[in-house]
Image (cartoon, helix red, strand yellow):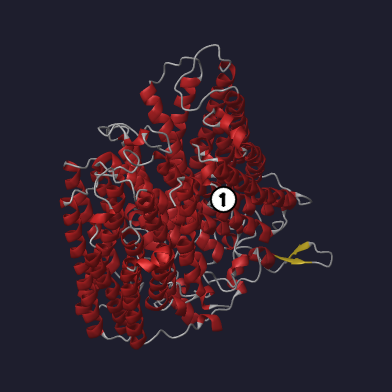
Amino acid sequence: MVLDTSKDLVPAQPTGIWSWITTVDHKRIGMMYGVTALVAFFIAGLEALFIRLQLATPNGTILSADAYNQLFTMHGLTMLLVVVMPVGAAFMNYFIPLHIGARDVAFPRANAFSYWLFLGATIMLLSSFVLGGAPDGGWFGYAPLSTQLEEFVRMDYYAIGAQLLGIASIMASANFIATVFTMRAPGMTLMRIPVFTWMAVVVSFLLIFSLPIFGVGLFQMYFDRNFGTQFFSGGGDPLLWQHLFWLFGHPEVYVLILPAMGIVSEIIPVFSRKPLFGYPFVVFSGIAIGFMGFGVWAHHMYTAGLGPVAEAGFGIATMLIAVPTGVKIFNWIGTMWGGKVRFELPMLFSIGFVSLFVIGGLSGVTHSVVPSDYQQHDSYYVVAHFHYVLFGGGVFGFVAGAYYWFPKWTGRFLDKRMGLWHFWLMLLGFNLTFAPMHILGLNGMPRRTYRYGEGLGWEFWNQVATVGSFIIGVSFLIFAWNLIKSRKNGVEAGPDPWDGRTLEWSISSPPPVHNFDEIPIVEHVDDFWHRKYATDEEGRAVRMTDVTGGTLVETDTGGDGSHEEEDMHMPSPSYYPLVAATGITTVGYGLIYAPGAGWVVAGIGTLITMWGVFGWSLEPVTRDEHHD
Amino acid sequence: MTSQSAPVEVHDHHDIKPIRKAAMWVFLGSECMFFGSMIATFLLYRNETADGPGAEIFDIPFTSASSFILLMSSLTMVLAHNAFENRDPRATRIWLLATAMLGTTFLAGQVFEFTEFVHKGLTLSTSSFGSAFYMLTGFHGAHVAIGVLMLMTMFYLSFSGRLFDDRGLNVELVGLYWHFVDIVWIVIFTVVYLLQV
Amino acid sequence: MAETAHRAHPSPSTYWVIAGILAVVTAIEIAVPSISALDPVKVPLLWALAAVKFFAVVGFFMHLRYEKKLYRTLFFFGVFGVFPLFIVVLLTFNAL
């Protein structure tokens, strides 16, 4: 290995497929999450286009009822659990350590394990299409529909696949929480953490306390289907599933949206050249959303007959949760107000996020009113609402993040012309697709029907929605092409292309393996900004002339050399996380086909898992590396 | 500045301990939700016996004895941890083995109990009561079994002299997990057994 | 800083005392259902006794009362979070 002698102790970037398979580097794991989720996004998007084609005309004949059920279920399941959540995980993996000034996450191998298990579960869910049919009971798999037809494996794929994704997420969340609470750089107090990382903490807490509940429900569904238990049938009550599901499912909604809110809270200050307006309010409203998110699950169940007291209570709680959400909207607007707004691509998508999320949020408030919800329940109005928050909100936020941080990942900008086409087509296509669904829903079109008759007045708006959905498709093809092309041929960006405020911009693009040559010492919120700018008497930011971006970390801290030596021991690569994840995925496949031959597969999987877990537990965390 | 926020040597041997413990505690918090959901399911179905056997088949003296054994395994576990902190491999080994033996005894008791209940006509599919009972106690038993496996791993390591190396797993973390399994049983013993008869 | 210099862990004699207390509480628990005079308070009493054992193990054997506040916060989110959620669930079934 050829190394600069002055940087003798700096680990070099390993190359080759094997280095990716054994990687424990949070940045590479983040990349792998992102790429996997993007591929899944295109698959799930294709499923949506089939759905739209089927519904473009009355009495559509493109899909059978059976195929339609599989496609809409998998569209929802994939988009939520395999796209939006992992995209959030991709950003969290990459940026939590960079934001808090750490060299890696707390448990690099557990982090790799989370990714591999997520990949295994993703492959499992997608493979169901060719291995006996995909889940077809809706993404929330209501019992007793989901526990019938035990001779088909479809909902077993749902039960086991979601279970594995849950295990992966719980491990990742415990990892992020331990990272943020114990590995912050000196001076990085909790109230100096960038907002995105704060939202990541809230999301991790939501997941860690809601997923186990879902896990129990999934086990019960699985046992009911395969071992004749009576959790949701016989003396059991199907309503229990609804509770267990939504006790997870509602916090999950915030799991999906909070990372996007965090990203936008990073972008808007940078492109307004102002600090985030009311940083503590944004943080505390995020925490409040987290807490309240646990207390509103039954608003998905108004029509299940919970009784007036429960419905009134949950209705009021749901209205209240709009308050911290509204606080954030005002904070973002307040940040832009009076700022020097630059309409770069990340900013355009962020403004798109704020605008569309407001629309989705307001239609959400109409759901909180119980009598109104009785009318809207299971109609296209609901479909319109949650696409406005999850696509108009979530996806716009994540795409904004991609345009914002692509220069950090690759050292190059995404192409601006293609980006503008992407933005305007996506905005147009999105509104053409989902705005008409409000009208369709209020006109009585139920969701999850594979076709509708003529003369119900739904033809026109369905056609508009279908046209819109293909415009979205085109916009994302442009995005994909932009990603592929700009990775190698984009304009060079340098370490700090946007005049950023947070620590990730203080290091080179792409960042070195060890992130920071020296761990920064933090003195402010937006610490990097304060290293670049002083304030004059009138409160205006004045750029300090003696420093340049990219070298600030070195110039700012005085370290002693003996420390530095120890610092550079990065965790060694390991293939055991992959082995353990492969084992658990194999167990999962076995359980799907159990009882019977499935037990053999599950047994083999258990052995592989034990090999992985024991090897992992017993290997040293770091291996001494000698470069000479 | 607290030591929490000064992780300059991230993977240094002294610093990894609080990080691991934080992750372990938050994982145990998560497990509370897992067992809480199953306990709630049991409470919901406690009377749904479908004219099959219900709580009256519980053998309280027997379960009390096995509960007591599991409770005392927490004592031996904490003594193992104490010996581990004092870098005493021999005492650590003895107390680890004692803990694993007590855990195995508890498991044997559970196997016996399940066999008895099946003979009395209570199976996983008899009634919602049976489903909820077996799922809750079965998942708890699986946790005990995993705990025994980890204890035996530690026991094995104590012979190779690698007990005090820095590894993914150590006696303290195994101890936290083991005590947690014990406190879950404290709740199960009260809610499922004592309150139902 | 002072808050992280947590108190020393207890000695083995403390562990034996705690184990003794746990044994006594367990004996009381087992006795409670058979004493008919206690029937009206049986449910809260048994819950309270279980809580005593629970927190004795958590506090002493798991050393939580000697550790950083962070660990307590992380764990108690789960312990105290689970109760309100499932009390509400069971109330909607009229099952409490």
Q: Residue at x 45, y 51 (%)?
A: A31
Q: Seen from this angle, which residue lies furthest right?
A: A538
Residue A358: which quarter of the image?
top right
Chain where mark 1 sits: A
Q: Is residue A399 visible?
A: no
| Between A105 and A449, the one nearer to me in the picture | A449
Q: List x then y, in percent, for residue C34.
A: 31, 67
Q: List x then y, in percent, for residue B111.
A: 18, 59
| Between B183 and B176, the one nearer to me in the picture | B183
Q: List x then y, in percent, for residue A108.
A: 40, 63
Vertical arrangement, residue A341 with respect to residue A570, above or below: above
| Between A217 and A451, the one nearer to me in the picture | A217
Count the numbered circles shown: 1
Residue that badge 1 annotates = A258
Q: Is residue C27 visible?
A: yes
Residue A445: which quarter of the image?
top right
Q: Amino acid at mark 1?
A: Leu
Drawn side of residue B159 relative to residue C83, left or right: left
Crowding near pointer 1: few (<14 within 10 Å), some, many (20+)? Answer: many
Vertical arrangement, residue A233 with respect to residue C11, above or below: above
Q: List x then y, in percent, for residue A174.
A: 44, 61
